[in-house]
Image (cartoon, rainbow, N blue to C red):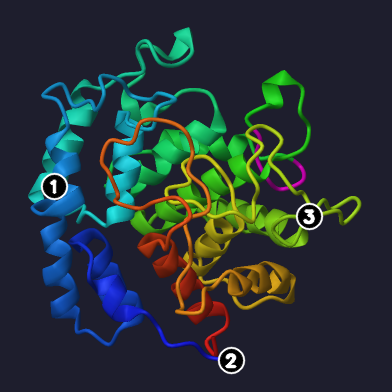
Amino acid sequence: MSTTLPIPWLLDSEPALRWQVLRDLTSASADEVAAERAKVATTGLGAQLLALQAPDGRWAGTAWNHGYDSTMHALMLLRDFGLDPAGAPARRALDLVRTHVTWQGCGPEECASNTFFAGETEPCINGQVAATGAYFGANVRGLIVRLLGEQLPDGGWNCDVERGSTHSSFNTTLCVLEALLAYERSTPEAQPAVTAARLRGQEYLLERQLHRRKSTGEIIARDRKSGADWTHFAFPTWWHYDLLAALDYLRAARVAPDPRLAEALAILVGKRTADGRWLLEAQYPGRMPVDLGETLGQPSRWLTLRALRVLQWFQPSH
């Protein structure tokens, strides 16, 4: 059964979201989309976030933190907002990061002198750094090579390998997959090994229907580390995993409709409200650098955008 799309509500927002609605959910021309996207750097959330960067290139005085307002997290949001990597504001911000930001005081001691895009040691963090770096045109080849070498026999990745884990985690695997996809898209000379590793990682998720144990078929109700329910959707997700985040990655990777996604898609469709929107069901504790203006338990424009474009790709009749 089709539902009326809440396009006017989505467009009654700000440039970071509006340009993506125009591109993904309407018949707007390329010129209209580009004009709206250009506003991300000068108006609303994107401009607010750019203004928070210090002269030393950092946000919140650090490359990374648990508070979600660090340099890494700010760059992740700017990528989510669609700040044009080729524009002068993005180039200026990235030049400051490249020139000044290191992992001093916020990563393992042996990584203290690493430049920001050299990363640290955990594949989940390095995946997030590489994904943003690739999007903004930074050289992240070293990180990509490292991540390829850390892929586990089951096809995924896990930050707990150094603590004895031998199986992959959904969270870390999705972080790395987003990095590999961004690198392939931004680097024409990307090696076939990158694509091969990404496809193996995708299969790790698909074999498990995005939220089941391969060994028993049992649903994984909650994340082992955070306790988060993977069927409760958040934006932003940061390093956390949920079904919508996984589906949106698969859409971005242009994965063909697959029967192994049926359960996750049914859960997504079942969460649509009567007026065609999705609610913000989860927020992760920590300091946000900018206020997205969304309230837990209330309709979320960001989640609705993501959900609608997932369904448009995998279930166009919805």
- Tell me, yes or no, whether the highlighted magenta stretch contains residue 238: no
Tag 3, which secondary structure?
A: loop
Q: Is residue 301 left or right of residue 253?
A: left
- Density class for disc 3 (Cα within 10 Å; few <14, some 14-19, many ≥20) is some
Q: Quadrant of residue 112?
A: top left
Can residue 204 be spotted in the picture? yes
Tag 1, which secondary structure?
A: helix
Mark seen at residue 1? 2
> x, y (%) of residue 295?
39, 51
Q: Which residue is drawn at 68% across and 20% down?
A: 162
Q: Is residue 148 left or right of residue 46?
A: right
Q: What residue type is labelled 1?
A: Ala
Q: Give the CA separation, mark 2 to mark 3.
A: 27 Å
Question: What are the residue bounds of the magenta stretch?
Answer: 153-158
Q: Quadrant of the N terminus?
A: bottom right
Q: Name the residue under label 1.
A: 47
Q: Residue at x 43, y 68 (%)?
A: 304
Secondary structure of the magenta portion, mostly? loop
Dot placed on the residue nearer the N-terminal end, 1 or 3: 1
Q: Which of 90 and 153 is in front in this view?
A: 90
Mark seen at residue 30? none
Dot placed on the residue nearer the N-terminal end, 2 or 3: 2
Q: In this view, does 112 lie above or below 198?
A: above
> x, y (%) of residue 81?
28, 55
Q: In which quarter of the image is residue 141?
A: top left
Q: Nearer the viewer, mark 2 or mark 3?
A: 2
Q: Mark 3 points at which residue?
A: 212
Q: Is residue 36 left or right of residue 77?
A: left
